Image (cartoon, rainbow, N blue to C red):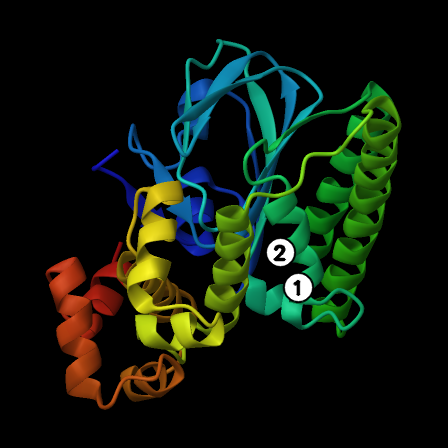
Amino acid sequence: MKHYQIVNIQEILRLKKGIAYKGEIGVFVSNNPKEFYISGNLPVYVNAFSYALVIEGHAKVSVDENVFSLSPNKLCILSPLHLTYFHDLSADFKCIFLCMHKDFIDKIGMFNLRQRIAISINTYSNPIFELSPQESDILVGCIENISTQMARNGHRYHLEIIQNSLVRFYLELDNILEIKNLKSEKDESCVASIPRNRMKLQGFITLLMNNFKEEHNVSFYAKSMNITPQYLTRIVKAQTGKTVNAFIFELIYSEARNLLSSTDLSIQQITYKLNFADQASFSKFFKRHSGISPQNFRESHFTH
């Protein structure tokens, strides 16, 4: 698909009237099909780890152009590098959606980014899980609790109570997935090995999510993986349809929009945070992608 958008948590939750915490974690519930489309009729990359759990109705989701059917109690686990498009939603479709930026996950000491990415990568090719009604109820309760804690703005330990509610969600989710994996291993006489190029893609995604703010060059990722930039670009493009540079720049652009719209950081501070040589370089990069300057983007955001 040539036409798509990269969106961040703040943009999703603003459109869907959900609840978010500093652009780093958010929850929304769709009560009708029209509310659920994340970016109109365009497929999207969401700059977050996302979990969509169907409560009622039916739909289809295209993930990297593979089409999956959704029905009640099905959970869709998406990484930031999944190109996603929900379509063919039934009139009674209802879904609860949790998304979180990797920076928020990093703040929780007992759950490191590598563990979270490992789960997302293991489900990269088949991101849909069939849950029992009981398992679905447990996860819905966990996500609703996260939303409740985010709404408690006056709490002295606001961040901590949100983190604790997220820890509970991950403990329940990991328990469900580990049980399913054990059952799957028992049912299969042999387990297929992961193709070499798929393992390379896993390594790239891990590096990218850890380093895209600081490292903007393909050579860094290739060198870290002991392969050539040409080979890295070839295997990433073959499996995702996109170049390494495209992923790097689009993630930076999404992060820039998020920082401009959900923080009070100055343009200079954002320039430093995203590792541009100077403010002029950052402004040129942002204008090339958005058509307007970072300052105009921030002003137009806060006047609407």
Residue 276 in view of the camera:
yes
Left or right, 211 with reference to 148: left
* Percent x, y of residue 252: 34, 67
Q: Who's the residue at 34% across and 43% down the image?
A: 238
Secondary structure under the numbered disc 2 in the rendered image: helix
Left or right, 1 with reference to 209: left
* Percent x, y of residue 242: 30, 48
Quadrant position of the C terminus in the picture: bottom left
Q: Nearer the viewer, residue 118 or 39?
A: 118
Instruction: Quickly name the residue at label 2.
Output: 117
Mark 1 touches mark 2? (CB < 8 Å)? yes
What distance separates the C-alpha of mark 1 from that of mark 2?
5 Å
Residue type (three-letter) at the residue carrying disc 1: Arg
Instruction: Quickly name the residue at label 1.
Output: 114
Q: Who's the residue at 24% across and 90% down the image?
A: 277
What is the crowding at mark 1: few (fewer than 14 residues within 10 Å), some, or many (at least 20)?
A: some
